[in-house]
Amino acid sequence: MTTEVKICGLRSEPALDAALAGGADYVGFVFYPRSPRNIEPAAARALADKARGRAKIVALLVDPDDALLDDVIATVAPDIVQLHGAETPGRVDEIARRFGKPVMKAVAIATADDVAAALEYTGHADRILFDAKPVPGEALPGGNGIAFDWQALAGLEGRVDFMLAGGLTPGNVGEAIRLTGARAVDVSSGVESRPGEKDPDLIRRFIQAAKIVKQTT
Ligand SMILES: O=C(O)c1ccccc1N[C@@H]1O[C@H](COP(=O)(O)O)[C@@H](O)[C@H]1O
C-alpha cells in the first residue's frame, strides 16, 4: 500500500495534469475568497470533470453557510467536502446529513493536547486532517506552508484515520510519513513557486517522494 496524496489549491490545467499524471489520489479546490487559491465553482467544475474517476475531488470550504455549500456541491459535484474553519462536530454532522458527502474536518495542531481535543470529531467526520495552527494574525486558517511538531501525533498510528498537512514539501514529506505513520498527506504551498501558483515539477516530485515510502502496516 502506498501513501495517499492530496494536491490542494489547484487552479490550472497544467497543475491538474501534473497531479493526475503523478498519481495523486485527491485533488482539492479552494472555495474561500481570501485565499490566493480561491477558484470560482464553474472554473473548478471544468477541472474536476477532467479529474473525475481518476482522483477524488475535494471541495475545501471555511465555515461555509448552506447557500455556499449548495452552490459548490451542485456545480462541482465533489466526492468529499473538506471543512477548514471552526465548524463544530454538530455542524459536521449537519453538513454530512444534508449534502450526503463524506466530510474531512481540518483541525489546527500545535501540541499533543490539540490532537487529543481533535478526537472529538471522531464519529462525526469521516476523516480528520491535522494541519498546523496558524500563527496569531496569520492571514489564512490554512495553506500557510507551516509545519507543526509531528511528535504531537505520537501513538496515533493505526488508531485514527487521519491525513497530515501543514508545511509539507517534496523534501520533508518522506520523513513526515515515516515519523507519523500517516496513510495520507496533503500539500498546497509546498508545491508552489509563489502563493497560488502551482509548479508542475514540484507536484511530480512531491507525489514521488510520498509514494516511495513503504507503509509498514
Ligand atoms: O490553501 C489555502 O489557501 C487554504 C485556505 C484556507 C484554508 C485551508 C487552506 N489550505 C489547506 O491548508 C493545509 C496546509 O496547506 P500548506 O501545504 O501548509 O500550504 C492543506 O490542507 C491545504 O488544503
Image (cartoon, rainbow, N blue to C red):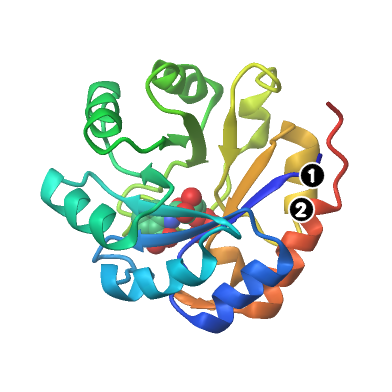
Q: Residue at x 40, y 48 (%)?
A: 135
Q: Earlier in the sequence, mark 2 or mark 1?
A: 1
Q: Marks 2 and 1: which is nearer the front?
A: 1
Q: Residue furthest left?
A: 67
Q: Is residue 205 left or right of residue 33?
A: right
Q: Front-most of 123 and 152?
A: 123
Q: Is residue 135 left or right of residue 21?
A: left
Q: Front-most of 205 and 81?
A: 81
Residue 178's place in the image compared with 200, above or below, is above
Badge 2 density bin: few <14, some 14–19, many ≥20, Cα 10 Å: many
Can residue 6 be spotted in the picture?
yes
Q: Secondary structure at mark 1?
A: loop
Q: Front-most of 108 and 61?
A: 61
How many numbered marks have been drawn onto this rendered protein structure? 2
Image x and y of residue 186, in percent: 58, 51
Can residue 145 be spotted in the picture?
no
Q: Residue at x 27, y 53 (%)?
A: 73
- Identify residue for label 1: 2
Quarter of the figure that contains the N terminus: top right
Q: Residue at x 28, y 24 (%)?
A: 93
Name which quarter of the figure residue 19 lies in. Answer: bottom right
Quarter of the figure that contains the C terminus: top right
- Identify residue for label 2: 210
Q: Residue at x 33, y 76 (%)?
A: 43
Residue 72's place in the image compared with 205, above or below, is above
Q: Secondary structure at mark 2?
A: helix
Residue 156's place in the image compared with 170, above or below, is above
Image x and y of residue 25, in percent: 63, 53
Q: Amino acid at mark 2?
A: Ala
